[in-house]
Image: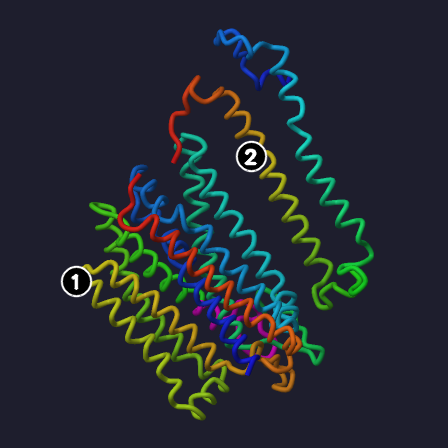
Amino acid sequence: MLWRFFPDYTRRRSIACACGGTSFVAILPAPFPYIAMTAGWMTAEIGRQPWLVYGLLRTADGASPLVHSGNALFTLLGFLGIYLTLGLLFLFLIAQTIRHGPAGHSAQSEHA
Amino acid sequence: MMETFWYCAVTLMLAMYAVLDGFDFGLGIVYRFVARTEADRRIALAAIGPVWNGNEVWLIAAGGLLFFAFPKAYAAGFSGFYLALILVLWLLIARGLALELRSHLNHTLWRQFWDAVFAGASTLLAIVLGAALGNLIRGMPLTQGGYFFVALWTNFMTGPDPGILDWFTILMGVTSVAILAFHGANYLAMKTEGQLRGQARRAAWLTGFAVLVLVGLAVASVPFVQPSFHLNYAAHPIGSILPLIGLASLVAALGFRRRNGDAGAFYATSLMILAMLASTAWRSYPNILIATNDPANSLTVTNATAGAYGMQIGFWGFLIGFGLIIVYQVIAHRAFWGKVQL
Protein backbone atom coordinates (compact mmCIF):
# COMPACT_ATOMS: atom_id res chain seq x y z
CA MET A 1 0.00 0.00 0.00
CA LEU A 2 2.74 2.46 1.04
CA TRP A 3 4.64 1.61 -2.09
CA ARG A 4 1.94 3.20 -4.21
CA PHE A 5 3.12 6.62 -3.05
CA PHE A 6 6.66 5.95 -4.09
CA PRO A 7 7.21 5.62 -7.83
CA ASP A 8 10.19 3.35 -8.34
CA TYR A 9 13.02 5.63 -9.32
CA THR A 10 15.27 2.65 -9.97
CA ARG A 11 13.65 1.88 -13.25
CA ARG A 12 13.84 5.44 -14.53
CA ARG A 13 17.16 6.44 -13.04
CA SER A 14 20.39 4.64 -13.52
CA ILE A 15 22.11 6.13 -10.47
CA ALA A 16 23.39 3.30 -8.36
CA CYS A 17 22.56 4.66 -4.88
CA ALA A 18 18.83 5.01 -5.55
CA CYS A 19 18.29 1.27 -5.49
CA GLY A 20 15.23 -0.25 -3.80
CA GLY A 21 16.67 -1.46 -0.50
CA THR A 22 18.39 1.68 0.82
CA SER A 23 15.66 4.11 -0.24
CA PHE A 24 13.08 1.99 1.59
CA VAL A 25 15.12 2.18 4.79
CA ALA A 26 15.49 5.94 4.26
CA ILE A 27 11.73 6.53 4.33
CA LEU A 28 11.05 4.44 7.42
CA PRO A 29 11.96 7.18 9.97
CA ALA A 30 9.50 9.65 8.38
CA PRO A 31 6.80 9.34 11.12
CA PHE A 32 9.21 9.68 14.04
CA PRO A 33 9.53 13.50 14.13
CA TYR A 34 5.73 13.73 14.36
CA ILE A 35 5.62 11.17 17.17
CA ALA A 36 8.47 12.89 19.00
CA MET A 37 6.94 16.37 18.77
CA THR A 38 3.47 15.24 19.82
CA ALA A 39 4.78 13.13 22.68
CA GLY A 40 7.03 15.94 23.93
CA TRP A 41 4.15 18.41 23.89
CA MET A 42 1.86 15.97 25.72
CA THR A 43 4.53 15.28 28.32
CA ALA A 44 4.78 18.98 29.10
CA GLU A 45 1.02 19.58 29.22
CA ILE A 46 -0.12 16.43 31.03
CA GLY A 47 2.90 16.26 33.29
CA ARG A 48 2.20 19.74 34.66
CA GLN A 49 -1.33 18.89 35.82
CA PRO A 50 -3.12 19.84 38.01
CA TRP A 51 -1.22 23.11 37.57
CA LEU A 52 -1.70 25.66 34.82
CA VAL A 53 1.30 27.66 36.04
CA TYR A 54 3.36 25.26 38.12
CA GLY A 55 3.00 25.98 41.82
CA LEU A 56 1.08 29.21 41.23
CA LEU A 57 -2.24 28.66 39.45
CA ARG A 58 -4.34 25.51 39.30
CA THR A 59 -6.03 24.56 36.01
CA ALA A 60 -9.41 24.56 37.78
CA ASP A 61 -8.84 28.16 38.94
CA GLY A 62 -7.60 29.30 35.55
CA ALA A 63 -10.81 28.50 33.66
CA SER A 64 -12.96 31.41 32.47
CA PRO A 65 -15.81 31.69 34.99
CA LEU A 66 -18.49 32.80 32.52
CA VAL A 67 -17.72 30.67 29.45
CA HIS A 68 -20.24 27.82 29.46
CA SER A 69 -19.22 24.24 28.81
CA GLY A 70 -21.42 24.20 25.69
CA ASN A 71 -19.32 26.99 24.18
CA ALA A 72 -16.12 25.14 24.97
CA LEU A 73 -17.51 21.92 23.46
CA PHE A 74 -18.54 23.79 20.32
CA THR A 75 -15.06 25.25 19.82
CA LEU A 76 -13.40 21.91 20.65
CA LEU A 77 -15.45 20.19 17.95
CA GLY A 78 -14.62 23.04 15.58
CA PHE A 79 -10.89 22.59 16.19
CA LEU A 80 -11.20 18.82 15.73
CA GLY A 81 -12.92 19.42 12.41
CA ILE A 82 -10.27 21.93 11.27
CA TYR A 83 -7.37 19.67 12.19
CA LEU A 84 -9.00 16.61 10.62
CA THR A 85 -9.45 18.56 7.39
CA LEU A 86 -5.88 19.85 7.64
CA GLY A 87 -4.54 16.33 8.18
CA LEU A 88 -6.37 14.99 5.15
CA LEU A 89 -5.20 17.95 3.03
CA PHE A 90 -1.64 17.30 4.22
CA LEU A 91 -1.75 13.62 3.24
CA PHE A 92 -3.31 14.49 -0.12
CA LEU A 93 -0.68 17.14 -0.95
CA ILE A 94 2.20 14.95 0.25
CA ALA A 95 0.94 12.16 -1.99
CA GLN A 96 0.82 14.62 -4.90
CA THR A 97 4.38 15.76 -4.22
CA ILE A 98 5.63 12.19 -4.04
CA ARG A 99 3.90 11.29 -7.31
CA HIS A 100 5.77 14.17 -8.94
CA GLY A 101 9.03 12.51 -7.98
CA PRO A 102 12.29 14.16 -6.97
CA ALA A 103 13.04 17.68 -8.20
CA GLY A 104 14.88 17.84 -11.49
CA HIS A 105 13.62 14.42 -12.42
CA SER A 106 10.08 15.32 -13.38
CA ALA A 107 10.15 19.05 -12.77
CA GLN A 108 7.19 20.61 -10.99
CA SER A 109 5.11 22.65 -13.38
CA GLU A 110 5.02 25.88 -11.40
CA HIS A 111 5.28 27.38 -8.00
CA ALA A 112 3.91 30.79 -7.14
CA MET B 1 2.03 57.63 34.50
CA MET B 2 3.33 54.17 33.65
CA GLU B 3 -0.26 52.98 33.17
CA THR B 4 -0.86 55.73 30.62
CA PHE B 5 2.31 54.80 28.79
CA TRP B 6 1.18 51.17 28.52
CA TYR B 7 -2.31 52.21 27.45
CA CYS B 8 -0.69 54.17 24.60
CA ALA B 9 1.65 51.25 23.82
CA VAL B 10 -1.21 48.74 23.47
CA THR B 11 -3.16 51.24 21.35
CA LEU B 12 -0.12 51.82 19.14
CA MET B 13 0.39 48.08 18.60
CA LEU B 14 -3.28 47.56 17.71
CA ALA B 15 -3.27 50.56 15.39
CA MET B 16 -0.10 49.32 13.64
CA TYR B 17 -1.81 45.96 13.26
CA ALA B 18 -4.88 47.59 11.72
CA VAL B 19 -2.74 49.56 9.24
CA LEU B 20 -0.42 46.69 8.27
CA ASP B 21 -2.64 43.62 8.28
CA GLY B 22 -5.44 45.98 7.21
CA PHE B 23 -4.00 46.42 3.72
CA ASP B 24 -3.73 42.70 3.12
CA PHE B 25 -7.28 42.14 4.46
CA GLY B 26 -8.38 44.95 2.16
CA LEU B 27 -6.58 43.37 -0.77
CA GLY B 28 -8.45 40.15 0.05
CA ILE B 29 -11.78 41.98 0.05
CA VAL B 30 -11.31 43.48 -3.43
CA TYR B 31 -9.17 40.61 -4.77
CA ARG B 32 -11.84 38.62 -6.59
CA PHE B 33 -13.32 41.73 -8.20
CA VAL B 34 -10.15 43.42 -9.42
CA ALA B 35 -7.93 40.44 -10.32
CA ARG B 36 -9.83 38.49 -12.94
CA THR B 37 -7.17 36.39 -14.65
CA GLU B 38 -4.81 33.84 -13.15
CA ALA B 39 -1.82 36.04 -14.04
CA ASP B 40 -3.37 39.05 -12.27
CA ARG B 41 -4.28 36.97 -9.24
CA ARG B 42 -0.72 35.75 -8.86
CA ILE B 43 0.56 39.32 -9.04
CA ALA B 44 -2.01 40.47 -6.48
CA LEU B 45 -1.04 37.66 -4.09
CA ALA B 46 2.66 38.33 -4.67
CA ALA B 47 2.03 41.96 -3.60
CA ILE B 48 1.30 40.79 -0.05
CA GLY B 49 3.18 37.47 -0.21
CA PRO B 50 6.36 38.54 1.63
CA VAL B 51 4.65 40.73 4.26
CA TRP B 52 1.19 39.44 5.30
CA ASN B 53 2.61 36.89 7.70
CA GLY B 54 4.71 39.44 9.57
CA ASN B 55 1.83 41.91 9.60
CA GLU B 56 -0.31 39.39 11.47
CA VAL B 57 2.21 39.12 14.29
CA TRP B 58 1.36 42.68 15.41
CA LEU B 59 -1.94 41.28 16.72
CA ILE B 60 -0.11 38.65 18.76
CA ALA B 61 2.25 41.35 20.05
CA ALA B 62 -0.67 43.60 20.99
CA GLY B 63 -2.36 40.72 22.83
CA GLY B 64 0.91 39.94 24.62
CA LEU B 65 1.34 43.56 25.70
CA LEU B 66 -2.25 43.69 26.97
CA PHE B 67 -1.60 40.51 28.98
CA PHE B 68 1.59 42.01 30.36
CA ALA B 69 0.32 45.45 31.29
CA PHE B 70 -3.39 44.95 32.03
CA PRO B 71 -3.90 41.26 32.88
CA LYS B 72 -7.38 41.78 34.31
CA ALA B 73 -8.62 43.46 31.14
CA TYR B 74 -6.96 40.72 29.10
CA ALA B 75 -8.63 37.96 31.14
CA ALA B 76 -12.03 39.65 31.03
CA GLY B 77 -11.86 40.51 27.33
CA PHE B 78 -10.60 37.16 26.10
CA SER B 79 -13.14 35.15 28.09
CA GLY B 80 -16.00 37.58 27.47
CA PHE B 81 -15.44 37.64 23.72
CA TYR B 82 -14.61 33.92 23.71
CA LEU B 83 -16.78 32.97 20.74
CA ALA B 84 -15.81 36.01 18.66
CA LEU B 85 -12.08 35.49 19.28
CA ILE B 86 -12.23 31.79 18.39
CA LEU B 87 -14.01 32.87 15.22
CA VAL B 88 -11.16 35.32 14.49
CA LEU B 89 -8.68 32.51 15.03
CA TRP B 90 -10.50 30.15 12.66
CA LEU B 91 -10.75 32.87 10.03
CA LEU B 92 -7.02 33.67 10.34
CA ILE B 93 -6.25 29.94 9.97
CA ALA B 94 -8.48 29.64 6.90
CA ARG B 95 -6.96 32.74 5.35
CA GLY B 96 -3.39 31.57 5.92
CA LEU B 97 -4.25 28.14 4.50
CA ALA B 98 -5.76 29.71 1.40
CA LEU B 99 -2.62 31.77 0.76
CA GLU B 100 -0.29 28.84 1.34
CA LEU B 101 -2.22 26.02 -0.35
CA ARG B 102 -3.51 27.80 -3.44
CA SER B 103 -0.31 27.35 -5.42
CA HIS B 104 0.22 23.70 -4.51
CA LEU B 105 -2.07 22.32 -7.16
CA ASN B 106 -2.49 23.60 -10.69
CA HIS B 107 -6.19 22.97 -11.03
CA THR B 108 -8.86 25.61 -11.73
CA LEU B 109 -11.36 24.32 -9.16
CA TRP B 110 -8.68 24.06 -6.45
CA ARG B 111 -7.51 27.64 -7.04
CA GLN B 112 -11.02 29.09 -7.27
CA PHE B 113 -11.92 27.38 -4.01
CA TRP B 114 -8.94 28.87 -2.13
CA ASP B 115 -9.52 32.27 -3.78
CA ALA B 116 -13.06 32.20 -2.36
CA VAL B 117 -11.74 31.19 1.09
CA PHE B 118 -9.13 33.98 0.98
CA ALA B 119 -11.64 36.66 -0.04
CA GLY B 120 -14.38 35.41 2.29
CA ALA B 121 -12.11 35.12 5.33
CA SER B 122 -10.59 38.57 4.68
CA THR B 123 -14.05 40.15 4.47
CA LEU B 124 -15.37 38.38 7.58
CA LEU B 125 -12.22 39.31 9.53
CA ALA B 126 -12.72 42.97 8.64
CA ILE B 127 -16.33 42.71 9.87
CA VAL B 128 -15.41 40.92 13.11
CA LEU B 129 -12.52 43.26 13.96
CA GLY B 130 -14.68 46.32 13.18
CA ALA B 131 -17.43 44.86 15.36
CA ALA B 132 -14.85 44.24 18.10
CA LEU B 133 -13.97 47.93 18.10
CA GLY B 134 -17.70 48.66 18.21
CA ASN B 135 -17.96 46.48 21.31
CA LEU B 136 -15.15 48.36 23.03
CA ILE B 137 -16.92 51.65 22.30
CA ARG B 138 -20.37 50.44 23.37
CA GLY B 139 -19.14 48.59 26.48
CA MET B 140 -20.19 45.31 28.02
CA PRO B 141 -22.07 44.11 31.13
CA LEU B 142 -19.13 43.62 33.53
CA THR B 143 -19.68 41.88 36.85
CA GLN B 144 -18.10 43.20 40.04
CA GLY B 145 -15.46 40.51 39.73
CA GLY B 146 -14.49 42.04 36.38
CA TYR B 147 -15.87 39.38 34.04
CA PHE B 148 -18.57 39.27 31.39
CA PHE B 149 -19.82 37.01 28.65
CA VAL B 150 -21.67 38.25 25.61
CA ALA B 151 -23.52 36.02 23.14
CA LEU B 152 -22.87 36.51 19.43
CA TRP B 153 -26.16 38.43 19.27
CA THR B 154 -29.23 39.11 21.41
CA ASN B 155 -31.84 41.57 20.12
CA PHE B 156 -29.42 43.70 18.06
CA MET B 157 -29.92 46.66 20.40
CA THR B 158 -27.17 48.42 22.35
CA GLY B 159 -29.09 48.15 25.68
CA PRO B 160 -27.92 46.68 28.98
CA ASP B 161 -27.80 43.10 27.64
CA PRO B 162 -26.03 43.51 24.30
CA GLY B 163 -24.65 40.85 21.96
CA ILE B 164 -21.38 41.04 20.07
CA LEU B 165 -23.47 41.95 17.04
CA ASP B 166 -25.97 44.80 17.40
CA TRP B 167 -26.92 47.58 15.02
CA PHE B 168 -23.95 49.71 16.03
CA THR B 169 -21.29 47.00 15.93
CA ILE B 170 -22.63 45.77 12.58
CA LEU B 171 -22.36 49.35 11.28
CA MET B 172 -18.78 49.41 12.61
CA GLY B 173 -18.08 46.08 10.89
CA VAL B 174 -19.37 47.30 7.53
CA THR B 175 -17.45 50.57 7.93
CA SER B 176 -14.31 48.58 8.64
CA VAL B 177 -14.83 46.52 5.45
CA ALA B 178 -15.11 49.75 3.45
CA ILE B 179 -12.06 51.36 5.09
CA LEU B 180 -9.85 48.30 4.67
CA ALA B 181 -11.05 47.71 1.10
CA PHE B 182 -10.12 51.33 0.28
CA HIS B 183 -6.78 50.92 2.06
CA GLY B 184 -6.04 47.58 0.35
CA ALA B 185 -7.07 48.81 -3.11
CA ASN B 186 -4.71 51.77 -2.72
CA TYR B 187 -1.93 49.38 -1.74
CA LEU B 188 -2.63 47.11 -4.73
CA ALA B 189 -2.67 50.10 -7.09
CA MET B 190 0.67 51.24 -5.66
CA LYS B 191 2.24 47.80 -6.14
CA THR B 192 1.02 46.96 -9.67
CA GLU B 193 0.89 48.20 -13.24
CA GLY B 194 -1.31 48.02 -16.31
CA GLN B 195 -4.81 46.59 -16.29
CA LEU B 196 -4.66 45.31 -12.71
CA ARG B 197 -3.68 48.76 -11.47
CA GLY B 198 -6.59 50.26 -13.43
CA GLN B 199 -9.04 47.85 -11.75
CA ALA B 200 -7.55 48.53 -8.32
CA ARG B 201 -7.89 52.27 -8.86
CA ARG B 202 -11.57 51.86 -9.80
CA ALA B 203 -12.17 49.76 -6.67
CA ALA B 204 -10.37 52.35 -4.54
CA TRP B 205 -12.45 55.15 -5.99
CA LEU B 206 -15.75 53.37 -5.26
CA THR B 207 -14.81 52.21 -1.77
CA GLY B 208 -13.39 55.67 -0.98
CA PHE B 209 -16.83 57.20 -1.27
CA ALA B 210 -18.38 54.35 0.72
CA VAL B 211 -15.85 55.16 3.47
CA LEU B 212 -16.90 58.81 3.47
CA VAL B 213 -20.58 57.89 3.97
CA LEU B 214 -20.06 55.04 6.44
CA VAL B 215 -17.51 56.86 8.63
CA GLY B 216 -19.94 59.78 8.81
CA LEU B 217 -22.74 57.45 9.97
CA ALA B 218 -20.53 55.64 12.49
CA VAL B 219 -19.13 58.84 14.01
CA ALA B 220 -22.63 60.33 14.21
CA SER B 221 -23.99 57.31 16.10
CA VAL B 222 -21.22 57.14 18.74
CA PRO B 223 -22.89 59.72 21.09
CA PHE B 224 -26.07 57.59 21.16
CA VAL B 225 -24.14 54.42 21.95
CA GLN B 226 -21.53 55.71 24.41
CA PRO B 227 -22.49 59.10 25.93
CA SER B 228 -19.34 59.13 28.08
CA PHE B 229 -17.23 59.54 24.95
CA HIS B 230 -17.58 63.33 24.94
CA LEU B 231 -16.07 63.68 28.44
CA ASN B 232 -12.42 63.78 27.37
CA TYR B 233 -13.21 66.35 24.67
CA ALA B 234 -15.00 68.51 27.20
CA ALA B 235 -12.04 68.32 29.59
CA HIS B 236 -9.28 68.68 26.99
CA PRO B 237 -10.45 70.21 23.67
CA ILE B 238 -6.91 69.75 22.30
CA GLY B 239 -7.76 66.05 21.80
CA SER B 240 -10.07 66.97 18.92
CA ILE B 241 -6.93 67.17 16.83
CA LEU B 242 -6.94 63.37 16.45
CA PRO B 243 -10.32 63.02 14.68
CA LEU B 244 -9.44 66.14 12.65
CA ILE B 245 -6.23 64.46 11.45
CA GLY B 246 -8.36 61.41 10.58
CA LEU B 247 -10.80 63.52 8.57
CA ALA B 248 -8.01 65.45 6.85
CA SER B 249 -6.33 62.16 5.87
CA LEU B 250 -9.56 60.85 4.39
CA VAL B 251 -9.97 64.02 2.33
CA ALA B 252 -6.30 63.80 1.32
CA ALA B 253 -6.74 60.14 0.33
CA LEU B 254 -9.66 61.03 -1.94
CA GLY B 255 -7.63 63.95 -3.34
CA PHE B 256 -4.66 61.70 -4.16
CA ARG B 257 -7.13 59.18 -5.63
CA ARG B 258 -8.50 61.82 -8.00
CA ARG B 259 -5.02 62.49 -9.35
CA ASN B 260 -4.09 58.78 -9.37
CA GLY B 261 -1.45 59.31 -6.72
CA ASP B 262 -1.42 55.67 -5.61
CA ALA B 263 1.35 55.87 -3.02
CA GLY B 264 0.02 59.14 -1.59
CA ALA B 265 -3.46 57.65 -1.25
CA PHE B 266 -2.06 54.59 0.52
CA TYR B 267 -0.07 56.67 3.03
CA ALA B 268 -3.14 58.87 3.58
CA THR B 269 -5.38 55.87 4.38
CA SER B 270 -2.65 54.52 6.70
CA LEU B 271 -2.59 57.81 8.61
CA MET B 272 -6.40 57.87 8.62
CA ILE B 273 -6.60 54.45 10.31
CA LEU B 274 -3.93 55.40 12.86
CA ALA B 275 -5.67 58.69 13.68
CA MET B 276 -9.14 57.16 13.94
CA LEU B 277 -7.99 54.42 16.31
CA ALA B 278 -5.92 56.88 18.35
CA SER B 279 -8.94 59.15 18.67
CA THR B 280 -11.14 56.22 19.81
CA ALA B 281 -8.55 55.21 22.41
CA TRP B 282 -8.20 58.81 23.56
CA ARG B 283 -11.96 59.15 24.04
CA SER B 284 -12.15 55.88 25.95
CA TYR B 285 -9.24 56.64 28.32
CA PRO B 286 -8.87 55.76 31.18
CA ASN B 287 -11.36 52.94 30.52
CA ILE B 288 -10.15 49.78 28.78
CA LEU B 289 -13.42 47.87 29.08
CA ILE B 290 -16.47 50.07 29.72
CA ALA B 291 -19.24 48.57 31.88
CA THR B 292 -22.75 49.16 30.48
CA ASN B 293 -24.47 48.34 33.77
CA ASP B 294 -22.47 50.21 36.44
CA PRO B 295 -19.57 52.56 35.67
CA ALA B 296 -17.88 51.38 38.89
CA ASN B 297 -17.36 47.96 37.24
CA SER B 298 -15.41 49.37 34.31
CA LEU B 299 -11.87 48.09 33.93
CA THR B 300 -9.54 51.07 33.75
CA VAL B 301 -5.80 51.59 33.40
CA THR B 302 -5.57 51.77 37.21
CA ASN B 303 -7.71 48.83 38.38
CA ALA B 304 -6.72 46.38 35.64
CA THR B 305 -2.99 47.00 35.85
CA ALA B 306 -0.14 44.65 36.66
CA GLY B 307 2.33 45.63 39.37
CA ALA B 308 4.30 48.86 39.11
CA TYR B 309 7.64 47.02 39.22
CA GLY B 310 6.87 44.87 36.18
CA MET B 311 5.64 47.88 34.22
CA GLN B 312 8.84 49.78 34.95
CA ILE B 313 11.04 46.87 33.85
CA GLY B 314 8.85 46.22 30.81
CA PHE B 315 9.21 49.83 29.70
CA TRP B 316 12.82 49.29 28.57
CA GLY B 317 12.01 45.87 27.15
CA PHE B 318 9.24 47.40 25.09
CA LEU B 319 11.40 50.24 23.76
CA ILE B 320 14.16 47.85 22.67
CA GLY B 321 11.70 45.29 21.23
CA PHE B 322 9.68 47.91 19.41
CA GLY B 323 12.83 49.42 17.92
CA LEU B 324 13.93 46.01 16.66
CA ILE B 325 10.51 45.32 15.10
CA ILE B 326 10.54 48.66 13.31
CA VAL B 327 14.03 47.98 11.92
CA TYR B 328 12.93 44.52 10.78
CA GLN B 329 9.74 45.83 9.17
CA VAL B 330 11.63 48.56 7.31
CA ILE B 331 14.13 46.01 5.97
CA ALA B 332 11.38 43.58 4.95
CA HIS B 333 9.35 46.23 3.13
CA ARG B 334 12.41 47.76 1.46
CA ALA B 335 13.47 44.36 0.14
CA PHE B 336 10.21 44.16 -1.80
CA TRP B 337 9.91 47.87 -2.58
CA GLY B 338 8.22 49.08 -5.75
CA LYS B 339 6.10 47.26 -8.30
CA VAL B 340 5.64 43.51 -7.96
CA GLN B 341 8.11 41.47 -10.01
CA LEU B 342 7.13 37.81 -10.48
> Residue A89: which disc?
2
Camera-nearest residue between A68 and B196: B196
Residue B158, magenta (yes or no): yes
Q: Residues within 10 Å of mark 1 (few under 14, many from 20)?
A: few
Residue labelled with disc 1: B259
Q: Residue at horizontal 38%, vertical 88%? A: B238
Residue A2 x, y percent position in the rendering: 63, 19
Under circle 1, the secondary element is: loop
The chain under label 1 reads B
Look at the image and tell me in which quarter the C terminus of chain B lies: top left
Query: On the picture, is B34 further left or further right than B6?
Result: left
Q: Residues within 10 Å of mark 2 (few under 14, many from 20)?
A: few
**Residue situated in front as seen by the camera: A93 or B324:** B324
Magenta part of the protein: which range? B155-172
Overall secondary structure of the magenta section: loop
Quadrant for the N terminus of chain B in the image: bottom right
Disc 2, SS: helix
Q: In terms of depth relative to the viewer, which is nearer, A14 or B162?
A: A14
Measured as percent of width and height from the top left, residue B279 is found at 42, 78
Residue type highlighted by circle 1: Arg
Q: In screen coordinates, is B294 left or right of B61?
A: right
Q: Magenta span has A39?
A: no
Looking at the image, is mark 2 or mark 1 nearer the viewer?
1
Q: Quadrant of residue A65?
A: bottom right
- In this picture, residue B318 sits left or right of residue B248: right
Disc 2 is attached to a residue of which chain? A
Q: Is residue B104 above or below residue B271?
A: above
Count numbered badges in the picture.
2
